[in-house]
Image: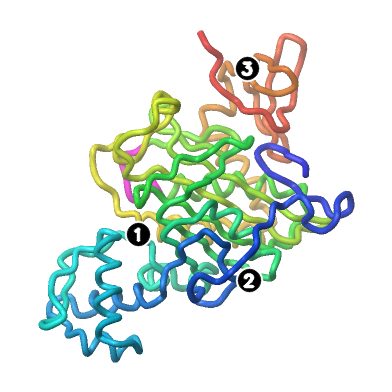
Amino acid sequence: MVRVAGLLFVLSHVLPHNSAITKSPTTPVGKVSRAGAAAPRRSYQSDVRLGQIVRLLMDHATVVVSGTKISQQIGTTRSQVWRLIQQLRRLGVDIAGHPATGYQLRALPDLLLPDILAPLVRGTIFSEHIHHYYKIGSTNIAALEAATAGAPEGSVFLTEEQTAGRGRSSRSWHSSRSAGIYCSVVLRPLLPPADVLILALAVALAVKAAVEEIGANLKVDLRWPNDLLLEGKKFCGILTEMSAEATRVRHLVVGIGVNVNHSDFPASIEKEATSLRLATGTEWSRVELTAALLKSLDREYRNLLRKPDAPGSILRRFSQQSSYVRGMQVHVDENGGFDGVTESLDPRGFLQVRTAHGMRTVLSGSVRPKPQ
């Protein structure tokens, strides 16, 4: 396994196929939504009937829907409908009613269920294979296992809560229940491994565009290569993990963690972390933001694969939209650490830093503003 600029590379000409990807035993915990691989153990995958009930209640939002009608529509018993309704209520879905009278949504739910998201991302590569979990160790691990087993490109893995969310350099990612977006997608680009860093920069641009589309007055900063900031504090991290041969990518998994409606953070990170809610003072729709994010990522990805000038455009836009690429005094945590002033991105997407001893290329180190 090789780490370059926040990307984890598994190179098959050096190592046996995927030998460096940690694999957990897999057992289905419920039917996988919209086709795909089985879920890892110790995960709590959504029963697809939950999404079907929510969709049915949304489609009949102005009336009470009887338990009989729901049971007929989703192919189960009325007593099972009642149990599923109770499960949805425990997840925070506001449903009025009783088995004797029927059920009605009081408010649109903010759960990232396939039946809610799929219609919003129709026409993208992400609409057909959406997987949702109540709780999982890591969406990236689930996506990596699925990719290795042959999951199709565009497979999306979402969870309400992660118990072992991962960030860059083996750091953990704080994943409060139903407060953030914890998302991993499987891609199979026809690209050489050397171009994947540019793809990772394109992902950051896609997330930035999605956030600013909904929060029009927000000014999101990009910290090379994979962090998004508001007022100097991190609210989003991106982790890209790849299986590749010397000349081609087998598959890669892009993990995106966004702090959306977090109201606080553990003491260990509260000085450097923020959320969209804390930054704006308002509650955000995770469904709306996830849909915008996947549509924005679809556009960037298609452009990269189809347009010859896309890599240059990505480098230019990232440089223009990041305060970290030029003229910032930074400390780089690489090879013992060094200080310098950022100069530019090179043609491959690596950060150039001018130091007292000349220009240095940052390959994998964390970049932070130099302490004053």
Residue 287 placement: quadrant: bottom left
Q: Name the residue under label 1.
A: 287
Where disc 1 sits, the SS reads helix
Left of 248 or right of it: where is 307? left
Quadrant of the image containing the N terminus: top right
Sequence-wise first label, 1 or 2: 2
Q: In the image, what residue type sits under mark 3?
A: Val
- Name the residue rendered at 54%, 38% in the picture: 172
Tell me where residue 130 appears, x and y as whole percent.
Answer: 49, 68
- Name the residue rendered at 66%, 64% in the picture: 147
Few, some or many C-alpha atoms within 10 Å of disc 2 (few <14, some 14-19, many ≥20)?
A: many
Tell me where residue 34 appears, x and y as whole percent.
Answer: 50, 77
36 to 24, vertically: above or below: below
Q: In the image, what residue type sits under mark 2?
A: Pro
Sequence-wise first label, 3 or 1: 1
Q: Which sits in the foreground, 263 or 201?
A: 263
Tell me where residue 57 appears, x and y as whole percent.
Answer: 23, 77
Q: Mark 3 points at which residue?
A: 341
Q: Which sits in the foreground, 365 or 346?
A: 365
Sequence-wise first label, 2 or 3: 2
Where disc 2 sits, the SS reads loop
What number is the disc on residue 152? Answer: 2
Query: How far is mark 2 from mark 3, CA to CA?
Result: 42 Å
Query: How far is mark 1 from mark 2, CA to CA?
Result: 23 Å
Q: What stretch is highlighted in magenta?
A: 211-218
Residue 52 belongs to the span the image colors magenta: no
Label 2 with label 3: CB-CB less than 8 Å = no
